[in-house]
Image: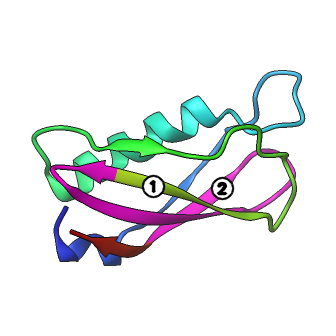
């Protein structure tokens, strides 16, 4: 990752698992990895890890971690509604 990762933020939609009260974390991890790879023009997508079983709840905030080539980034994810929509931003990077 590069320092410019601190400036990245994005909205992701439709992360509610079908007939579930939890977010689809696999979909979120894949979406975050793809967005980071695209926005940072990386040759490979980072590995993104999020907590398991996060309930759908407006304004709920949780963190995911992206890792690539020995660098990590903390991603703050905020649920924007009770339908599984979220926004995210990278809040910290370490080497």
What residue does disc 1 label?
A: 65
Where residue 23 sits in the image (x, y, percent)? 74, 39
Magenta stretch: includes residue 79: yes
Dots 2 and 1: beta carbons under 8 Å?
no
Question: Vertical placement of 78 versus 84: above or below?
Answer: below
Magenta stretch: includes residue 23: no
Residue pictured at 63% horizontal, 36% vertical: 25
Mark in the foreground, 2 or 1: 1
Where residue 74 sits in the image (x, y, percent)? 44, 66
Give the tally of numbered discs.
2
Q: Secondary structure at mark 1?
A: strand
The chief SS type of the magenta part is strand
Where residue 16 sits in the image (x, y, percent)? 75, 35
What residue does disc 2 label?
A: 86
Residue pictured at 85% horizontal, 61% vertical: 58
Residue pictured at 16% horizontal, 38% vertical: 44
Asked whether, in this view, residue 68 is left or right of residue 19, the answer is left
The image quadrant of residue 4 is: bottom left
Question: Vertical placement of 13 versus 80: above or below?
Answer: above
Q: Quadrant of the C terminus?
A: bottom left
Q: Residues within 10 Å of mark 1 (few under 14, many from 20)?
A: many
Asked whether, in this view, residue 44 is left or right of residue 5, the answer is left
Bounds of the magenta segment: 67-90
Question: Vertical placement of 41 versus 52: above or below?
Answer: below
């Amino acid at each position: 990752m590069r320092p410019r990762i601190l400036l990245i933020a994005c909205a992701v939609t439709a992360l509610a698992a079908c007939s579930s009260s939890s977010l689809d974390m696999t979909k979120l991890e894949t979406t975050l990895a793809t967005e980071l790879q695209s926005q940072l023009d990386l040759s490979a997508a980072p590995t993104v890890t999020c907590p398991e079983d996060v309930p759908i709840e407006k304004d709920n905030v949780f963190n995911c971690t992206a890792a690539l080539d020995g660098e990590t980034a903390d991603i703050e994810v905020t649920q924007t509604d009770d339908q599984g929509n979220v926004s995210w931003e990278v809040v910290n990077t370490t080497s």
